[in-house]
Structures are given as C-alpha cells and as structure tokens.
Amino acid sequence: MPLTWTITTQGGLGSVSLQGVYSAPANVDATTDVQITATSAADSTKSASVMVTVFAVPAIAVRQNNGHGEFYTTADGALFVPRGNDYMRINASMVRLQDGAIGYGRSTLNSTLYDPARTEQALATMQSQGYNVIRTFLDILDAGDIGNESGSGVSTMYMPTLLIF
C-alpha cells in the first residue's frame, strides 16, 4: 500500500525514504522531538505517527592526532583543553544509616532538594573562573529521586542533558 510521509517539527528536521526509513541530518544543534507520520495514499483518513528524539551533536569529541588522543570542539575542530571542577551539594537527610541514624549524602540533582537558581549561580561562577567541564554525582538514595515522577531512578528526560555536559 503506497504511503506518504511527513515530518512535523520546527525546520522539517531530516527526511523519510519511500520505504519509511528516517534519516536525521548529520549536524543537529539542539535535541529535538520529531513526529513522523505515514498516511495512506489511497485513504488520507488512515494514518499513524511516531515521535523520534534527535539528539544534538556533542559539543566535544575525541580524535587521534599524531598517534595521541585529544579532545576537540565539533563546531570548529579546535583543540579543547578541559579545565574542570567538582560541583556537589551535601545534605544531612539524604542517607539513613543501618543503625537508623541520619548520615550525609550528595543531593546536587535530587529533585526534592534541587535549587535551579543556586545551581545556575554556581555554574556561572565556575565558568567566569575559566572552568569548562564539571563533575557531579547522580546519587539516588533514601530521599527523593532525580526528576523521575514515576518512581525512583534517573528520568529519561535528564539523559540528553547529562550526555551533553
């Protein structure tokens, strides 16, 4: 049965072959959800859609140069020298010890304790001091979760951001 294919998103991201194979563009600046719809050519009231997430090209990649690995920026190919810092917040109510006492745990990205303004200020300060990478910890302990409204664990909506940064 012949089908017509349409892509619904800002900018018409990618293409679909006559066989229904979706191809994303080689360079994507921002992670985007793309809706792909197949419509019957014989009866335009019959259609089905699927949502696909196209992830942005990583800002930093690894390559070999004279037999040595190095980081580079994907936008312009320039050498990238990481200068990093740790970012973590500690909260006394995050860990329950075996004897029932409360210990200390990392709470940086815990959704019940997350403070976006404080995080933004800390990251802006590190950037102004020349840091271009951070390390943080994703601990899921007794209290709360990391953005997962359906239970404990890391929400899938966090993954693109974590992979980029």
Image (cartoon, rainbow, N blue to C red):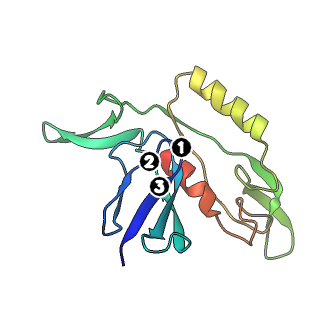
Q: Position of residue 49 (x, y in %)?
A: 53, 68
Residue furthest out toward the left: 66
* Residue shown at 14% from the left, 41% from the top: 67
* Residue shown at 74% from the left, 71% from the top: 150
* Residue shown at 45% from the left, 39% from the top: 29
User: Which residue position holds label 2?
Assistant: 13
Answer with the quarter of the image where residue 72 lies. top left
Number of numbered markers: 3
Query: Which mark identifies residue 10?
Result: 1
Distance Cα–Cα, label 2 vs label 1:
7 Å
Q: Contact (CB < 8 A) between labels 3 and 2?
A: yes
**Of callouts 3 and 2, the N-terminal one:** 3
Distance Cα–Cα, label 1 vs label 3:
9 Å
Q: Tell me if 19 is positioned left or right of 33 in this view.
A: left
Q: Contact (CB < 8 A) between labels 1 and 3?
A: no
Distance Cα–Cα, label 3 vs label 2:
7 Å
Circle 2 SS class: loop
Q: Disc 3 residue type?
A: Ile
Q: Disc 2 residue type?
A: Leu
Q: Position of residue 64 (x, y in %)?
A: 19, 42
Front-lying residue, 134 or 43: 43
* Residue shown at 31% from the left, 69% from the top: 19
- Nearer to us of marks 3 and 2 is 3
Task: Identify whether 25 is placed above or below 155.
Answer: above
Q: Tell me if 21 is positioned left or right of 115 in this view.
A: left
Query: Which mark identifies residue 135?
Result: none
User: Which residue position holds label 3?
Assistant: 7
Q: Position of residue 39 (x, y in %)?
A: 47, 68
Q: Contact (CB < 8 A) between labels 2 and 1?
A: yes
